[in-house]
Amino acid sequence: MGLEELINNCKKGNRQAQEQLYRDYSRTLFGICLKYSRNRTEAEDNLHDSFMVIYKKVDQFKFKGSFEGWLKRITVNTVLQKYRKEEPLSLVTENTEEVEPEVEGDYESISLDAILKHIQELPDKYRLTFNLYVLDGYTHKEISELLGTSQGTSKSNLARARKLLREKIEITKNKAIIGLLIFFLLGFCV
Amino acid sequence: MSKKNIDNLFQEKFRDFEEIPDKKVWNAIEASLDKKKKKRVIPIWWTLGGAAAALVIALVAFYPSYINDVAPNIISDTEKVNNTKDDAIKNTNEFITEPTKNINKTIVVSSNTDADVNTVTDSYKEKKEDKNSNALNTEAPKKDTINKSDHTQIFDTSQDTELTQIDKTEDVVNAEIETKNSDKVDYSFETEKNQEMVTSSANPRSNDDFNSSKNNLTEATGVASTENSSNTLKLNTKNPENSTNKTIVVDSINRSTDELGITENTIEEEIEAEKKSIFDEIETEEEVVNTDKNGRWSAGPNIAPVYYNALGEGSPVNSIFNENSKSGNTNLSYGLTVAYAINKKLSIRSGLNKVDYGYDTNGVAFSSTLQEASTEKIQNIDYSSTAKNIVVTSQSGNFSSSPTSDSMFAFEISNATSSQRDGTMAQQFGYLEVPLELDYALIDRKFGLNILGGISSLFLIDNSVTLTSGELTTEIGEANNVNSVNFSTNIGFGVNYKFTPKIRFNVEPVFKYQLNTFSDVSGDFRPFSIGVYSGLNFKF
């Protein structure tokens, strides 16, 4: 089944086509969900919701531009919508203070799981801003529109995100060094 | 490393980042798709049913051919009225001719033939011809040559009978004719011609044919008049005595003619009067028909504060809220009303209203979990994507699957001091309402009073459940047990004030009891609404 045929069948509500679409794109879209969500469970929820939106809106896809790009945008928007809606209940104090992160060091050894966890542990706005700006190339203007904040806030959120990530990574790194030291010490003692 | 490095680090790590989701995600998607499909089946029937109902109402209210039909109906009514008019005229004629069946009447009607009364024209034409064939103008002397004093004399001399009444009995008239004829005999027996005439004209009683007797009388009168005109002079010259007698005879005959004339005039007037009254009546009826036709339709806007609440202890959301206190909300309803007056008192009306209903369930506690657990969800609510990790319980805490404290935490990690929030849960519905009501006017003056009752079809267009705690509000989703079409029975009364006959101001408190708002209700929850509808009504 070619992509066009697949899309057309999805537009007709064909279950096989819907399943095929899921099989083809769920991994990529789940990756996005994992980056943007607080945890794996929420990421699964978001993936579910995103696919529901995709199946609902697939008939609006007019074969202009990349289908995968369209799917990614829908996924990002679905996740943003979720966390943006929860905004009234979010009691995180907004810090507009501009923080210049000065992060240095070698992070190459850090595992993907570890940095994913760091991102997920960021407060919603920091996480979303960092993802949008750093990983998906959105501008501050676009982010401010998407999240309903000012550009200044967006920049501040990004700086805070970087700072927190650096701290988390450094802590992890320190923990690793300490662990390594303990390992050597114990080995030495033995 | 610069800050760019950390960005680069993440960019590199997440480049082409993919992960295979758990199989349960697809299962959940499949279940949602199935649910959506199933869900669609029922609303389609409801929607079709509702649409059909709306169509019927629209057809009844606005079907153009119905309006076109109104005109022919009115025409047929008018024809009916015309027929009635004709009937009335016929009846009048019958009334004049049949019951009396006497000469007087026949003559009277024949002398009144003039145009209008077609049914009798032919026979009268013959009679007229008869009269004309005698070359006599019987009407002329009746109307023109006789003065009022003569009438008085005639009444004095002709006595006995009152000729002014239309419905004289045959006997009376015959008796009268006899009397006249006997007078004639008294006065004219000396003259052979007259006697013959009188004799022939004295036969009406034995002869049942009153027309012929009338003709006889006319001829008699005519001949007598002829004699009056021709013989009087002769008699005057030959025999003064005879001439006197003859003159008397002629006078008598003239008098009898006068009497007939008078009677005729009187009846003529009465017929005129009667005709007039019939025409008046017809005109009045037509006016009424026109007024009715013109003033039957009315329409106007209305607006109302609507208070919504429910009878009984129960909750359409979940049994855990059965005992929680509920408070009704006051919302707004607005729309258009179209009414058609069936008659002066009764009118049928419909329209379209947008109405919001809502109520609060008090004493609700809610919290958030990290992991979505279906057991903690309220089955009657379709959670929005943003609210899947909100756990709602009653403050009374009798929710069997209430989560353990381990799985509960505050809405935001940074504010984890309290694990749950107290507040209210508001359920809000928006409907398009199509009422079908009968309106009966008890008092229809400047100030009017009316009672009304009927049903409404309510089409769900908005449905939400929100949680409120202090100033924080979040939507948790929508109720899935609200029927997309439901009905209500309506009863109320209205007072109105007519600014002009065409513009009316109404205030109508209406109680609406909802019949099938929810498909699944826990406990006893019977919603109702009370609205005070005020609006203007324009007749056209």
Image (cartoon, rainbow, N blue to C red):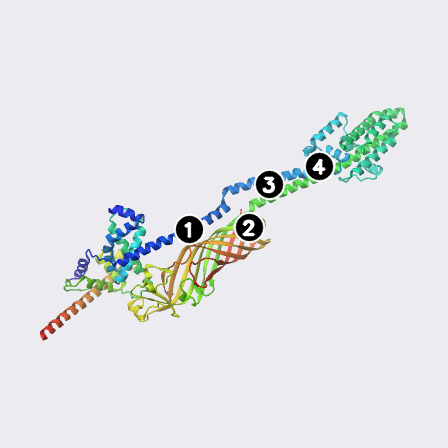
Residue B12 vertical placement versus B409 (above, below):
above
Amino acid type indicated by mark 2: Ser
Q: Answer yes or no: are tags 1 and 4 on the same subunit.
A: yes
Residue that numbered label 2 is attached to: B347
Q: Which residue is mark 4?
A: B93
What is the C-alpha distance between the residues marked 1 and 4?
65 Å
> What's the CA distance linking mark 2 and mark 1?
31 Å
Vertical order, B474 against A6 (above or below): below
Per the model, the C-alpha gap separating discs 4 and 3 is 23 Å
What chain letter is assigned to the residue under label 2? B
**Residue carrying label 3:** B77
Spot occupied by residue B145 in the image (x, y as percentages of width and height): 79, 32
The percent position of residue B243, horizontal first and vertical second, equals: 88, 27
Going from N to C along the chain, the mark reached first, 2 or 4, is 4
Is circle 2 on the same chain as circle 4? yes
Q: Earlier in the sequence, mark 2 or mark 3?
A: 3
Label at residue B45: 1
Callout 2: 10 Å neighbours few (<14), some, many (20+)?
some
Q: Is residue A60 visible?
A: no
Q: In the current view of this chain or complex, which residue is farthest to the bottom?
A: A189
Q: CA distance from mark 2 to mark 4?
A: 41 Å
